[in-house]
Image (cartoon, grey):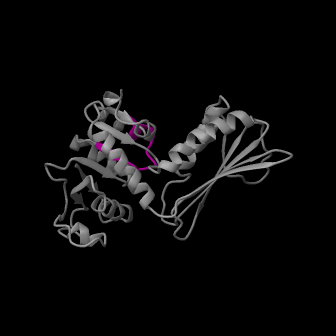
Amino acid sequence: MIRVTIIGAAGRMGRELCRAALETDDIELAGGTVEPGAPELGSDLGGLCGAGAAGVAATEDPPEDAGVLIEFTTPEATIEHLAYGKPHVVGTTGLSGEQHARVEEAARGAPIVLAPNMSVGVNLLRDVVRELSAKLGADYDLEVVEAHHRNKKDAPSGTALLLARAAAEGRGRALDEVAVYGREGHSPRNEGEIGIHALRGGAVVGEHRLIFYSGAEEVEVVHRALSRRTFADGALRAARFVANAQPGLYSMADVLAGGPPNLRG
């Protein structure tokens, strides 16, 4: 059994993670944290996520035997939680360069999986986008359009950047060299640029579209998250990986490669 503790268990993603952990045979929900003084403090985590009593209460800090920490919180909170020194699955987006460096530093002492999107489908799509972009070439104009719920704070999404970066890599370019974020006023398209656009509204879980345009055809790749459960299931898959990994910073590509590097044949 892989023991997991959910950081931010009272949030929408936190509740989905708790439910997924309770419904997954080889996962044990060891604990879940909420903010100090939160009304959910002391609540049964199973009741909190609608899965029925689990006998595990929400606390301010992870238990001593927390196992793997999983969180989709804020960049500031994530950096604070690195001090726990536990195996860690981080789905938090919007990390600055300095904050990413802090994660890298923490990974010298504990295994950490950091991914802007835990969906298995998105992470497999990354390789498809890289190859598609390489074979279509820069003659095809590329636009990336992402949509999320009205409360998402960072834009563009980490997933949009992940996929746009893969497309740029397929063309042998760095994303920073070719990215254009939105358009306004007199803005003619430059050769090889990748347009990236963010939509925010309603309760959209997540949608990412990459459209390759030529003068004769359009090729579109779409990923739609129908439920947050896809991210939760991916995070539990990452938890299985990181529970047996050596200290280091890992991605979902490592998770999907078939096991921790130190255990691969």
Is residue 94 rendered magenta in the image?
Answer: yes
Instruction: Please tell me which residue lies in front, 181 or 185.
Output: 181
Q: Please tell me which residue is depicted at 33% across the width and 40% down the height of the picture.
A: 241
Can you see residue 38? Answer: no
Q: Please tell me which residue is depicted at 72% across the width and 34% down the height of the picture.
A: 135
Q: Position of residue 195 (x, y in %)?
A: 69, 47
Q: Position of residue 62 (x, y in %)?
A: 19, 53
Is residue 172 rendered magenta in the image?
Answer: no
Q: Is residue 140 left or right of residue 99?
A: right
| Image quadrant containing the C terminus | top left
In which image quadrant can residue 130 be found? top right
Q: Residue furthest left?
A: 64
Q: Please tell me which residue is depicted at 57% across the width and 38% down the height of the picture.
A: 127
Q: Position of residue 255 (x, y in %)?
A: 40, 39
Q: Position of residue 237 (x, y in %)?
A: 36, 47
Query: Which residues lie in the magenta part?
Result: 88-101
Q: Is residue 125 left or right of residue 238?
A: right
Q: Is residue 248 above or below residue 194?
A: above
Q: Is residue 29 left or right of residue 253?
A: left
In which image quadrant can residue 102 be found? top left
Q: Is residue 61 above or below residue 254?
A: below
Instruction: Please tell me which residue lies in front, 34 or 37.
Output: 34
Can you see residue 160? Answer: yes
Q: Is residue 180 left or right of residue 226?
A: right
Q: Residue furthest right?
A: 216
Q: Please tell me which residue is depicted at 86% across the width and 45% down the height of the picture.
A: 215
Q: Is residue 203 above or below residue 253?
A: below
